[in-house]
């Protein structure tokens, strides 16, 4: 096992409200701390570290891990997902125990409710207990717990549910030992008052889109050819979360070696997207997406040099994009769904969240992935080799500098000014001019591109991009060629001639 830089950084930061050090394995003390984390905002316990940060390590770490896993599963009530792992620091084994803030507060250990107060674990006061119960009542009104009308037992994949029960026991994630589908679903809050919940439909329905059309996922793959961008795949995936996750996992395993040409180095670069990083990005999108709106969704766009996962919803208020590359606490948007994914072992299987995604990309020699949170949702983009990384203006969005030069900027502005003078459009502000320049650059570089492709690359909604495309068409900058569903955008002859003139003028100057 390699040294874990993240563990070193965590230890150097010292104990906090969400990080505690323990020198040795004392089951009761560990259960108390985890219970307090569950009743708060979650946290980690590092076992094998003294209070002052000295690393002493743990003997027989793997054996201790399995014993702790079984103990904590039954000691904390109600059952809670606890992630345990063995990590290396200074050549010594540490046990790391991690929990999220629980969705079924209050949690008890040994008949008591524990709470986190600064760096200490204390018994909760009557006021704190009242707050925890109130928070749980609010959670019961969450979209996940709302009833999905018209869903019957035969609409659920009972084999999948039974396999989940089996896997949860084998993974030591759950202690539900009976092979009873209804009892299992009731145990995990997926049945309320005799009716199945929305979370149950997302997880286990044979055809969830019959009840929740937003459960679909769109997968689009683009190719690169001499005549511009071509569409290799465009399909809508249907099925429950685990069916879609399995299909997408098989798809990314099939991507294999990819090649791009680096104009700067005049050579072909071979690379492969890191499978585990893509898996993590996909399962996070499926778990944490905003399912409330029937128009919400997840889309995956695959290009020759990038892989984009777009997810409806937004980051929690407490979490910013910049923090995703740092140590941060988890905020499950859909805790019931996340818990079942945990039971099946997918979260542990795929690594340690966003930090692991960054590590995998760096290890593969690729650029760091980029997260964006805009009005349409969260977008995660994986890029190709570092050698392809363009020099960036930090004041501009990713990808907009490609093909943007003085000649193009002048050409677009001239077309805009003519359009305003001729009465084709009203006055155009600087923001619109800038966006039209970027749009023109993308169409120039990717002939035959469509609105969805541009929207994905620009990190904007399709409707917003279509508005800019309409303006550009009115100005005679671009034109649409081909059938409505398969055609794309190209620069007009007038715009191409203007660029040629500007380029020639630049050579003379």
Image: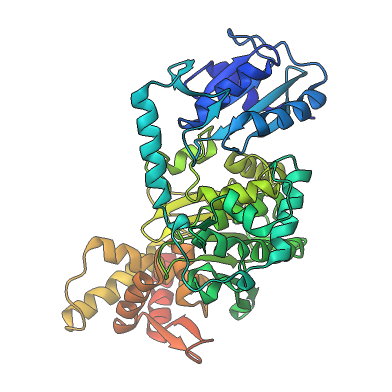
* Residue 257 in view, yes or no: yes
Toward the viewer: 65 or 490?
A: 65
Question: Whole-percent x and y of residue 16?
Answer: 49, 19
| 29 on left or right of 409 | right
Q: Which quadrant of the figure has residue 464?
A: bottom left
Toward the viewer: 296 or 468?
A: 296
| 218 on left or right of 501 | right
Against 12, is 404 above or below? Answer: below
For the C terminus, the image quarter is bottom left
Q: Which quadrant of the figure has residue 501?
A: bottom left
| 136 on left or right of 286 | left
> Residue drawn 42% across and 41% down?
136
* Residue 403 in view, yes or no: no
> Residue drawn 27% across and 61% down?
431
Question: Whole-percent x and y of residue 366?
Answer: 66, 48
Against 65, is 293 above or below? Answer: below
Name the residue furthest bottom: 483
Toward the viewer: 136 or 351?
A: 136
């Amino acid at each position: 096992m390699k040294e874990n830089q993240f563990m070193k950084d965590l230890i150097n930061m010292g104990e906090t409200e969400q990080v505690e050090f323990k020198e040795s394995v004392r089951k009761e003390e560990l259960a108390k701390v985890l219970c307090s984390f569950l009743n708060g905002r979650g946290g980690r316990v590092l076992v094998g570290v003294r209070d002052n940060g000295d690393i002493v390590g743990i003997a027989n770490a793997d054996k201790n891990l399995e014993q702790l896993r079984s103990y904590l599963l039954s000691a904390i009530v109600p059952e809670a997902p606890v992630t345990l792992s063995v990590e290396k620091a200074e050549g010594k084994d540490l046990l790391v125990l991690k929990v999220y803030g629980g969705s079924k507060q209050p949690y008890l250990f040994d008949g008591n409710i524990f709470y986190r107060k600064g760096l200490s674990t204390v018994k909760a006061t009557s006021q704190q207990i009242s707050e925890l119960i109130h928070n749980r009542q609010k959670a019961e009104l969450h979209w996940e717990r709302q009833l999905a009308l018209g869903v019957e037992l035969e609409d659920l994949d009972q084999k999948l549910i039974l396999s989940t029960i089996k896997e949860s026991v084998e993974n030591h994630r759950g202690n539900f030992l009976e092979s009873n589908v209804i009892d299992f679903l009731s145990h995990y809050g997926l049945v309320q008052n005799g009716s199945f919940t929305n979370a149950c439909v997302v997880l286990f329905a044979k055809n969830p889109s019959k009840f929740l059309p937003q459960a679909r996922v769109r997968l689009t793959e683009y190719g690169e050819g001499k005549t511009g961008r071509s569409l290799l795949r465009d399909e809508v995936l249907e099925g429950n979360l685990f069916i879609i996750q399995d299909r997408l996992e098989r798809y990314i395993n099939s991507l294999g070696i990819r090649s791009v040409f680096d104009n700067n180095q005049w050579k072909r670069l071979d690379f492969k997207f890191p499978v585990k990083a893509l898996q993590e990005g996909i399962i996070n999108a499926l778990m944490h997406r905003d399912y409330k709106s029937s128009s919400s969704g997840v889309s995956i766009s695959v290009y020759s040099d990038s892989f984009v996962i777009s997810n409806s919803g937004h980051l929690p208020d407490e979490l910013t994009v910049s923090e995703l590359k740092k140590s941060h606490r988890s905020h499950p948007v859909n805790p019931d769904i996340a818990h079942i994914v945990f039971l099946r072992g997918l979260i542990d299987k795929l690594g340690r969240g966003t930090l692991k995604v960054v590590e995998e990309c760096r290890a593969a020699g690729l650029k760091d992935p980029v997260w964006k949170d805009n009005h349409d949702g969260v977008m995660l983009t994986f890029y190709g080799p570092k050698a392809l990384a363009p020099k960036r203006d930090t004041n501009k969005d990713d990808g907009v500098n490609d093909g943007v030069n003085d000649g193009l900027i002048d050409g677009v502005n001239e077309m805009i000014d003519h359009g305003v003078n001729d009465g084709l459009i009203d006055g155009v502000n600087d923001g619109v001019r800038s966006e039209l320049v970027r749009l023109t650059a993308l169409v120039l570089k990717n002939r035959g591109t469509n609105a969805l492709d541009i929207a994905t690359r620009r990190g904007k909604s399709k409707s917003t991009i279509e508005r800019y495309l309409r303006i550009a068409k009115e100005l005679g900058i671009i034109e649409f060629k081909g059938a409505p569903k398969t055609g794309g955008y190209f620069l007009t002859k007038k715009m191409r001639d203007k660029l040629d003139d500007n380029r020639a003028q630049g050579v003379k100057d």
